[in-house]
Image: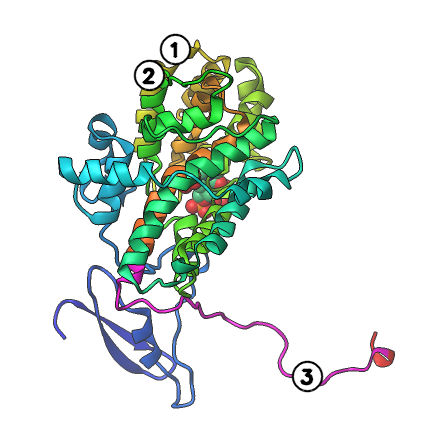
Amino acid sequence: MGQNSLTITDNRTGKTYELPIEHGAIRAADLRAIKTDPDDFGLMSYDPAFMNTASCSSRITMIDGDKGILLYRGYPVEQLAERANFLEVAYLLIYGELPTTTQLAQWIHEITHHTMIHENVKKFIDGFHYDAHPMGILVSTVAALSTFYPDARQVNDAKSRELQIRRLIAKMPTLAAFAYRHRMGLPYAYPDNDLSYCGNFLNMLFRMSESKYAPNPILERALDVLFILHADHEQNCSTSAMRTAGSSQTDPYSAVAAATAALYGPLHGGANEAVLHMLREIGSTNRIPDYIKRVKAGELKLMGFGHRVYKNYDPRAKIIKKVADSVFEVTGRSDLLDIALELERIALQDDYFIGRKLYPNVDFYSGIIYEAMGFPISMFTVLFAIPRTAGWLAQWLELVNDAEQKIARPRQIYLGPARRDFVAITERG
Ligand code: CMC
């Protein structure tokens, strides 16, 4: 088989096997040939939390975690954040190339004209308790959209997929904004087709009695950059949920609901919300050393720090720090920024964090910006879900078109009781 192979000797049998290596990986299914006898199921690999298992091949996003590099379709995220807008990046993620002027204009037109949601969705949102978390509302309403678009079940129809992709990217901000307005007890504000993607989102969130809402251009651009930074991140928890749900050929609204639910957790997209609670709990810079002590004692985690893949500064966090400056020029500086900067300074000099390669991630500074822009904490993860929808859909499209993919169905190592007979309740104990 030559050099691109792995030779394994099974010491249970003394037999030797040669497995091909492709793209730095062996195929786990090849291990099944390694058996102690013909009835043996064959060797499996055990990898809880997928620490070292590639579940797909992908051409969308590349992360070099040691070097702190993030590329979308080959383009560095720093260049995209500086020179592109979010819908241009969404197009790039989904179609693989940056759009031409005509393609971009058409794409923006189509997304803009799909922002409305059925009036019944409003009634559905009305049914939520007054203090319902907007992520709970978002998970439910995006799932509910599948009932409004039964054509979305035609996942093998390319035309239908294209339509659902446009609807989802267009309607997520509307659902998110309506969830916010419900929580605030405000009337819903309808989309304004004259505004940009982010400008319209700000309109649906913050418009009061004015007949035409004019977003602040600096805040509009800051949000657009934050959306670019959150658009995709290869096979993270929510994207894996999207692919797993999508692999059963469920419709994309239901799959996005699964992905949104995965994002909600504090170890994933919920971390931006957790960071704000943490910074408020710390309250002042002189209480940071005590907090760090508790983190090092294993009592708590430093939220917004650490990453499964990045063992270096998260490149997104670097850009977000710059965005913060432009936002604070408009909104005024947040007191929490000083706590965050000092927390970062102390942590990055501490052996606990250095040894474990724990650096600030995307969520460390984003919440401070969102707060300064007037978003309540409960909206932070929603602000992550909106742009990540583009990434989820790009990954879903790749999955649907990948002839090697099948329904996701991991194996397990069963360690429970062997077969035993039922015991009547009177004879138990
Ligand atoms: N604070 C303190 N210690 C930490 C932290 C942290 N934030 N993160 C990791 N560690 C320690 C961990 O206790 C372990 O120590 P030890 O080797 O002594 O047991 C070591 O570092 C390795 O951590 P791990 O838990 O094995 O790493 P993981 O890859 O399983 O977890 C993570 C990655 C992001 C879930 C984790 O770093 C974490 O919980 N961070 C805080 C939550 C957070 O900020 N999440 C946002 C991630 S970025 C945005 C996104 O993708 O959603």
- Contact flag, marks 2 and 1 (Cβ < 8 Å): yes
Query: Please, what secondary structure does the residue beneath circle 1 have?
Result: helix
Q: CA distance from mark 2 to mark 3?
A: 68 Å
Q: Identify the residue at horizontal 61%, vertical 27% (top origin).
A: 185
Q: Which residue is mark 1?
A: 330
Q: Is residue 7 left or right of residue 169?
A: left
Q: Which residue is mark 2?
A: 218
- Contact flag, marks 1 and 3 (Cβ < 8 Å): no
Query: Please, what secondary structure does the residue beneath circle 2 have?
Result: helix
Image location (x, y in percent) of residue 210: 46, 15
In the image, residue 417 lies in the stretch drawn in magenta: yes
Looking at mark 1, is its residue's CB closer than 8 Å to ligand 1? no
Say which label, 2 or 3, has the lower sequence index: 2
Magenta part of the chain: 398-425
Query: Outermost residue toward the right?
Result: 426
Among the 4 quarters of the image, the one containing residue 173: top left
Query: Please, what secondary structure does the residue beneath circle 3 have?
Result: loop
The disc placed on residue 309 is none
Q: Nearer the viewer, residue 346 or 251?
A: 251
Among the 4 quarters of the image, the one containing residue 200: top left
Question: Residue flagged by tag 1: what amino acid is it?
Answer: Val
In the image, residue 149 lies in the stretch drawn in magenta: no
